[in-house]
Image (cartoon, grey):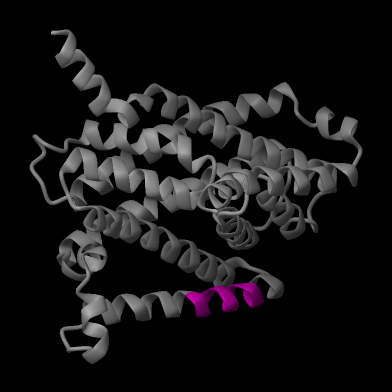
Amino acid sequence: MTSARNVVKWVLPFVVSAGILAVLISRIDTRGLLDRMTLDVALVLVPAMLAYAALTLWIEATSLVRLVPVSRNVFSLWTAARVKAASYLIYIINYALGAGSLTLLLKRRSGLGLSEAGGIVMLVALFDLAFLLLIATVGAALFGTEAAMLRAGVIASAGIGLVGGFVVLRTPRPLGPLERLRSMALFRAARTSSLGLLIELAILRFLFVSSFLSVAWATLMAFDIQVPVGDVVVNIAIVALISTLPIAVAGLGTGQAAFVFMFRQWADEETLLACSLAFSAGLILTRAGIGFACSQEFVREALAAARSTDA
């Protein structure tokens, strides 16, 4: 029974991605989609993706180093970068499995307990989610259309709930029956990190989310899809949130469906689907390349033991 459940867990994302993409492609002119994948698009997209990959890996590594409470001789910036890069290979399958692999690698390399390592990964993810919600709401309020502002209102409600939960974790007041839950190692990073460290983390994660929005905007520009700034911010944030649902491979299929729906006012389906596929493919290829370069992190202990035996 357990093995069957594991098979479903690994196979289902591929089935979902393939099914949604098949439906989307069946609705359009495939030749028209391919015609939109031009050299001019590549000349914009390739440098943008490479710059995005380098910048965000540095942000990810710096975030982990600042949160992991061990000496930099044990867990350096380079080590953090390798750990995060290796986890990209699993994040490609889905976000939840990627977070699990990062937790395991972080535990191995830092010496933290599994729950404490998971708490650090969760804290970073919560900051990213909070900034996606915040940027979408502010973008709609400043630049968006009436429809964008309506969607942002729904997003803001979720953000308020997220902030409320964080405040409950940080409050000095006893929580009665919930105190035992709050004191779990999983919530230690969120509960005990200093205000200065949280501000530093907030700056780093704001840069991370802004970088994602910027490379998405560059992709829209590469396909000559002209969208108001507020709608770009709100819609890309929503697409990003949908893409992280652990039901598809790297958000393929779900991300494309959301992208085509959210930007349907500004381009035809062939152009939107081509743009979304190019964006997803660019992210997957750059992260897969970086991940393969650091994939030995998954078997580091086994390799070290083999070298010791040979010696």
**Is residue 157 one of those drawn in magenta?**
yes
Nearest the viewer among 298 and 38 is 298
The image quadrant of residue 206 is bottom left
Q: What x and y, as percent, mark residue 80?
A: 25, 38
Q: Quadrant of the C terminus?
A: top left
Which of the two residues, 135 or 300, is positioned nearer the viewer here? 300
In x, y percent, where is residue 274? 75, 38
Is 112 inside the magenta-drawn segment? Answer: no
Q: Is residue 137 above or below residue 107?
A: below
* Residue drawn at (32%, 54%) of the image: 121
Residue 266 appearing in the image: yes
Q: Locate residue 89 relative to residue 122 in the image: left or right.
A: right
Residue at the (37%, 76%) spot, across then down: 163
Indicate whether 310 appears above or below 158.
above
Q: In front here: 125 or 143?
A: 125
Residue 133 point in image, percent of width and height: 49, 67
Secondary structure of the magenta portion, mostly?
helix
Q: In the current view of this chain or complex, which residue is farthest to the bottom?
A: 176
Left or right of 301? Residue 48 is: right
| Percent x, y of residue 25 | 84, 42
Q: Is residue 217 visible?
A: no
Which corner quadrant of the image does residue 75 belong to? top left
Q: Please give the name of the residue rendered at 44% of the width and 37% of the height, measured from the top-left corner.
A: 88
Q: Is residue 57 above or below residue 241?
A: above
Q: Residue furthest top?
A: 311
**What residue range appears in magenta?**
149-158
Seen from the viewer's position, the closer of residues 112 and 189 is 112
* Residue drawn at 55 percent across, 70 percent down: 142
The N terminus, quarter of image: bottom right
